[in-house]
Structure formats: structure tokens, C-alpha cells
Amino acid sequence: MDNREEKNKFWKGVLVGALVMAFAGLIIVGVSSGIFLIGRAVIDNRAQVEQVQGDGKDGENKELNLEFISSKMKYIQGIIDQYFLFDEDTEKVEDGIYTGLMYGLDDPYSVYYNAEQYQSLMESTSGEYCGIGVMVQQNRTTGIITAIKVFANSPAFEAGMLPGDILYQVDGEAVTGKDLDLVVKENIRGEEGTYVDITVLRGENAEETPLHVERRSIEVPTVEYQMLENQVGYIYVTQFDEVTAKQFEDAIDDLEDQGMEKLVIDLRNNPGGVLDTAVEMLAYVLPEDKLDGMLVYTADKNGEGDRYFCKDGKIQRESDDGSRDSRYPKEDDHELDVPLAVLVNGNSASASEVFTGAVMDYDAGIVVGTTTFGKGIVQNLIPLGDGTAIKLTTAHYYTPNGFDLHGKGLEPDVVVEMDEELQKKAVVELSEDNQLQAAIEAMN
């Protein structure tokens, strides 16, 4: 098959992927898992089964007729046993049944993981991994996986990968439409020193470009900072990991010691992460005397959920089930007292939007860039007791003023597109970053 036929097959696959897409989201290759899309802190490992009762009228929720389904499955299995030409892999068939059940929910974030996939997802994500050093995004409609950031001096950078490259094949296997978490964990990550062959499609003509990339142990930078001209502090947060809050607070402390007079927090291309981390970071910069200290809250299908506050120097969580807890984010009750700007774009998602939404509601800073991704829902990872698990969307989250951003995103106060030529570069110098310069000017 020549290249033209192969490309045609790819784009046909994209159209099919739009119909069968079972997962979409943002992650950093080899680091984030689906459970981090909005918060490990709200994961509940107690699976609860609730039957939705209905009167059978069209258009209303109905209870699944499990007896009928079981009878029909036995009937189909009998036909398979009698007529199917090939050997049946019963384990694979069973996995397919559960996968189909989750797919039928018509929610790209609710998926089934078999035992091998679940074990892969639960591997340590301590901030170091054997991967290639690229941040990727998957379109939840088409299933296309795109590189949105290539870390400087990473294996992907050295191999020539660029932002905007479409990941077409990994070791000869097409990856469009596959579960992104599993593409990362099972196809891209691997033993240190081994290589992965990635074919990307580049540019308007979708030119195939093969890349031979070494897997290396990489320390993922979650917080980078420096003092810019005119005492403007700059903090870049790549994701909300468990270690990020401490790194963020230390960065602010250091910049304040250096005489910081303004601060830019860069959340562009940040896919989100741990909810508790976003809450702790907010508590470190926002005042307690506004909005009753509310930082974010969640609500499930029954209107019940968790509310996160910062009061008396403590982060407090209150739940509708009556449980509550609190902890000290810092020995002192810190509050940012310099002008603040937050940089976002269309790849700023989930926990990034929690942070940005609270800053907007508190009127604590100016938001600059482009509209955020718009992921305002919570997933719980629920083990099923036999080594398998499901990830299920269970709640919305809301900004302190009650804004539901899901599917809409957050509109910046100052809308600025990044220059087109800069979007193609693997590394953009801060001095030429037009969005950053716009944020600094907006604070002035």
C-alpha cells in the first residue's frame, strides 16, 4: 500500500474515530493517568450500585432489563458456539461486553479497564518516568492525538518532534481513537534505554515523518520560575501533581524575597491533575475575607458533593454526607499582595480551570490568553474487586460563584492568540512570547 492509500486510510479512520471514540483528555506522556483529570482527592473506592427507576415512558431513564439482556446474551452465545468459524477468546469477549457497557454511556471519560490495563494505570507517577518528554492532547471527537508541548532537551526534542505533530503510529500500530492513557502507558513508556518508533503527520499536507526516540528516565518539571525584568515574577506550572503545591509555594516565597512586584502564573498547556493541589495553591494566594473563603465545590446527580474552603489559615473540606476535614497549608496564613496575571489557552484544563476560575471569581488577578478547554466534571476510579476497574464521571465542579464551565471553558479578560510562528516552535523564549508580554502589559 503506497503512502497516499495509507493516508487515506488514516483520515477514514479519523471519521470512524469520531463515532467510536471512547476516551479523550489531556495528559503528559508517561505521567498522568485518567484518574488525575480532576482530582485524586475526590476518588471514592466504594462502588455503589444504584438502580434508576422509571415508568417506561419514552425519553425517560429506564432500568436496564438485566434478565432480558442475560437471555439475549445466552442466545447470541449459542449462535456463536454453533456457527462461529474461529476459536473464541472468551476473556476478550467478556472484556468487550464491559467496554461496550461503558461506551453506551456516551461519555468519553467513562471507561472500563481490564486487569492488565488497570495495573498499568496504577503504576507510580511520582514525577519521574521512562518516556520521551512530550505533552499530548487527544481530541475527544476525532480521537486524534497531537503533541502540544515538547520539553526542551528531552528525547522527543532531540528526535525532532514539534508541537502540532499528530501521533499517527507507535511501533507500527495506529493509535488514533485508542484510549490515550493506555497509549502512553503501554506503547510509549518503556524500559530505560530502549527506543520507540513514532510516525507523526506534520503540516497542512500531513507529511509522514518517522521518529526514532529513546526512552529515558525523565524528571518532569511541574513548577519552573524566574524573575523577569522590572521585578515581574514568572511561574510556569506544567501540571498539578502531588508535589506541585510545595514547589509552587517555595517559588512564590523565593520571588517575594527577591522583591517581586508583579506575578504571572502560566497555566498554558496544563492538563490539570490533583484537585487537592489546586486547592492548596489557591489557598496560598487568595484572601480569606471574600466569598466565605470558598475555593471550589462539586455536585453529583443528586446535588450532593464537597465544598472546599480556606478559613483561619486552614484548608477545609465539607461534604454533604456529614464528613469534614481540615489541614494547615502553611505555618503562616499567606496571601499574595502583588498584581497577578494568569496565562491560559485551549489546552488549560480541569484543575487548571479550577485555579483560574477561583482567581476570576475573587477578582484577584487578570486572565490572559485564549478560552480554556472546558472540562468541569469529576471522574472516580472504582475498583471492581477482581483486578479490574471502571472510571466513571460522577459530578460537576463549580467555581466559587457557581459557574459550570464544562463544555464552555473560561473566557480570558484579555484575549490574545499566540503568534502563529511561535506555535510551531518547540521552545519559545519568554522575551518573544507575545501572550506573556500581553499579560505583563495588562498588569501595568
Image (tube, rainbow, N blue to C red):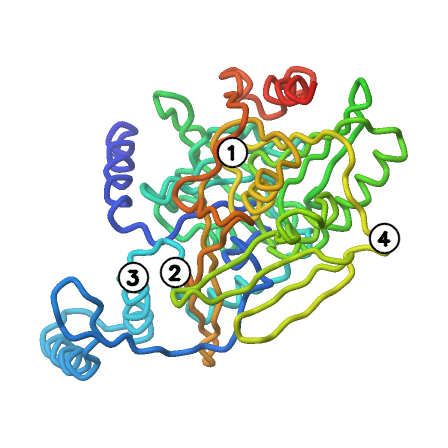
Evaluate if marks 3 and 2 touch, with contact meaning CB atoms under 8 Å apart.
Answer: yes
Callout 3: helix, strand or loop?
Answer: loop
Vertical placement of 27 versus 345: above or below? below
Distance Cα–Cα, label 1 vs label 2: 24 Å
Residue 355 lies left or right of residue 198; in this view the side is right
Q: In the rendering, at what x and y percent does residue 104 appear?
A: 26, 62
Callout 2: helix, strand or loop?
Answer: loop
Residue at the spot of label 3: 105
Vertical placement of 94 versus 306: above or below? below
Look at discs 4 and 1 and give the one toward the viewer: 4
What residue sits 61% from the left and 55% below the top? 274
Evaluate if marks 2 and 4 touch, with contact meaning CB atoms under 8 Å apart.
Answer: no
Residue 268 lies left or right of residue 175; in this view the side is right
Residue 44 lies left or right of residue 206; in this view the side is right
Look at discs 2 and 4 and give the one toward the viewer: 4
Distance Cα–Cα, label 3 vs label 1: 29 Å
Callout 1: helix, strand or loop?
Answer: strand
Extreme residue in the right direction: 257
* Disc on the earlier residue, 2 or 4: 2
Callout 4: helix, strand or loop?
Answer: loop
Residue at the spot of label 1: 148
Label 1: how many Cα within 10 Å (few below 14, some 14–19, many 20+)? many
Q: In the rendering, at what x and y percent does residue 329 appear?
A: 77, 56
Look at discs 4 and 3 and give the one toward the viewer: 4
Give residue 67's quadrant in the image. Answer: bottom left
Residue at the spot of label 2: 110
Residue at the spot of label 4: 332
* Disc on the earlier residue, 4 or 1: 1
Q: Is residue 148 visible?
A: yes
Q: Amino acid at mark 3?
A: Leu
What residue sits 46% from the left and 61% below the top? 299
Q: Amino acid at mark 2?
A: Ser
